[in-house]
Image (cartoon, coloured by chain):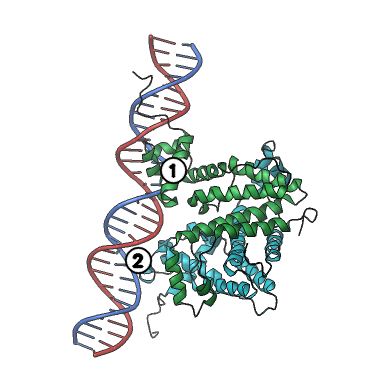
Chain colours: A cyan, B green, C blue, D red
DNA sequence: CCATTACTAGACCATCGATCCGGTCCGCGT
DNA sequence: ACGCGGACCGGATCGATGGTCTAGTAATGG
């Protein structure tokens, strides 16, 4: 009836990545297996390996797709505003896909990540700073903040705080303050410290 | 002749953790399997599960052992010096065991980690700062810095820089500067910015 | 019409974390 | 002195995974 058999749309790398992202969003890193991914794409697991060399490739591609969601700041006269916008967007994208925080221990060599890193380099170098040093400072801070936030938000804070209160003798400060707090405010404050500390001209430490 | 049969010393949790740490140091996270760990302890894999609930427990214990290597700073009149010492030791211990950086995406609830976190809380709170906020800012920065350093140092920078130079048109700043740089200096500089920004009295952002 | 390329799938392999079940050794109460 | 129960041990095994082998089928260009 239809011009082609309508059962299966063509399998493409884009479809694989999109489905992997959906699966990761729904079930996290542990839920992504090549079999389940193939099943959701209505194909066999072997077929995936025609488009992809290893599962690591899938993760790399999915992670770079997350970076693709980060908007590149427009033109700013203030480099600090541009950097802050980029870091805020960077963090927001990673937090939208919490699984991504747990696989950040891999080189970010995808085109989306590279494009944003290059933008960061250009912005900071253009302001008279040591580009790599300033860029690493900022992005390291973002990565660490996201990883820690995702890690601790996964826990049931009620149980954790109770655990700490039982050991108040050993950990008085932790028991007193608890572990929950305003992640957004902490991130913004620390980012502000870093940006304020970077003064063009004294580029190197 | 000997009081007991000398073949096998008793298997204890401490021996398991110590051997796991050695195995991780030698072969990384991928090299740690329950079978191989048992083999090195001259026992069967099943036996490990009498002392340990899951493999995750082994990783948690090994990671906390790494934190145990971090020296607690002595008494300082300057809270900034104390915090800097702790963060430097924290970073050094993680870098001594690069595998640890890749499993930092888990709650640090071991006694060694908690003891140091509590020390950090106390130091910062005692200085009139918002303890949790300041502590998270600092430790997030340390975690991110270590993870990124380990991640990028694993790569062959020569190949990576060549890869970038081939794409200099797309990533001009990256191609110009390359990715290698002085990790220690970058870390120290950024940590200085964070510490300088934390002014007691204006504890909250 | 055919052959080459793009693509698909089922069976299969080695390995992993974890468990079942059947043992062995040691300390303690009697 | 004894024996009994819990601490401890290990071979076989389970279900699942990442990845490959082999054998195909659909489309395309000569």
Q: Is A6 or B148 nearer to us in this picture?
A: B148
What residue sits 58% from the left and 44% below the top?
B70
Image marks 2 and 1: residues in contact by CB distance under 8 Å = no
In the rendered structure, the answer to whether residue D17 lies left or right of residue A97 reads left
What mark, if any, has residue B22 been given in the picture? 1
Q: Chain of mark 1?
A: B
Coordinates of residue B126 in the picture (x, y in percent) = 76, 45
- Indicate the quadrant containing the C terminus of chain A: top left, top right, bottom left or bottom right: bottom right
- Indicate the quadrant containing the N terminus of chain A: top left, top right, bottom left or bottom right: bottom left
What residue sits 61% from the left and 63% below the top?
A137
Examine the rendering and report whether any part of residue B107 can be seen: no
Compared to residue B126, the image places residue B176 above or below, namely: below
Q: Secondary structure at mark 2?
A: helix
What residue sits 46% from the left and 39% below the top?
B18
Crowding at dot 1, Cα within 10 Å, few <14 / some 14-19 / many 20+, comes out as some
Q: Would you identify the image quadrant in which residue A10 lies?
A: bottom left
> Could you tell me how far apart the alpha carbons at marks 2 and 1 are, in whole angstroms?
37 Å
Compared to residue B160, the image places residue B73 above or below, namely: above
Compared to residue B64, the image places residue A71 above or below, namely: below
In the rendered structure, the answer to whether residue A61 lies left or right of residue A72 reads left
Coordinates of residue D6 in the picture (x, y in percent) = 47, 26
Coordinates of residue C29 in the picture (x, y in percent) = 51, 15
Same chain shared by disc 2 and disc 1: no
Residue linked to disc 2: A46
């Amino acid at each position: 009836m239809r011009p082609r058999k309508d059962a299966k749309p063509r399998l493409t790398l884009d479809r694989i990545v999109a489905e992997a992202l959906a699966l990761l969003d729904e079930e996290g890193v542990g839920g992504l297996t090549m079999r389940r991914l193939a099943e959701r794409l209505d194909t066999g697991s072997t077929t995936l390996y025609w488009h992809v060399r290893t599962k690591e490739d899938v993760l790399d591609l999915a992670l770079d797709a997350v970076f693709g969601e980060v908007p590149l700041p427009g033109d700013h006269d203030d480099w600090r505003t541009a950097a802050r916008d980029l870091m805020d967007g960077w963090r927001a994208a990673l937090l939208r896909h919490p699984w991504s925080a747990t696989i950040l221990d891999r080189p970010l060599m995808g085109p989306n990540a590279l494009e944003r890193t290059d933008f960061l380099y250009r912005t900071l170098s253009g302001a008279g700073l040591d580009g790599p040093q300033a860029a690493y400072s900022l992005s390291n801070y973002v990565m660490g903040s996201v990883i820690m936030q995702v890690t601790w938000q996964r826990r049931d804070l009620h149980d954790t705080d109770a655990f700490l209160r039982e050991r108040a003798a050993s950990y008085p400060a932790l028991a007193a303050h608890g572990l929950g707090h305003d992640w957004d405010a902490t991130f913004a404050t620390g980012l502000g410290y870093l940006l304020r500390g970077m003064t063009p001209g004294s580029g190197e430490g």
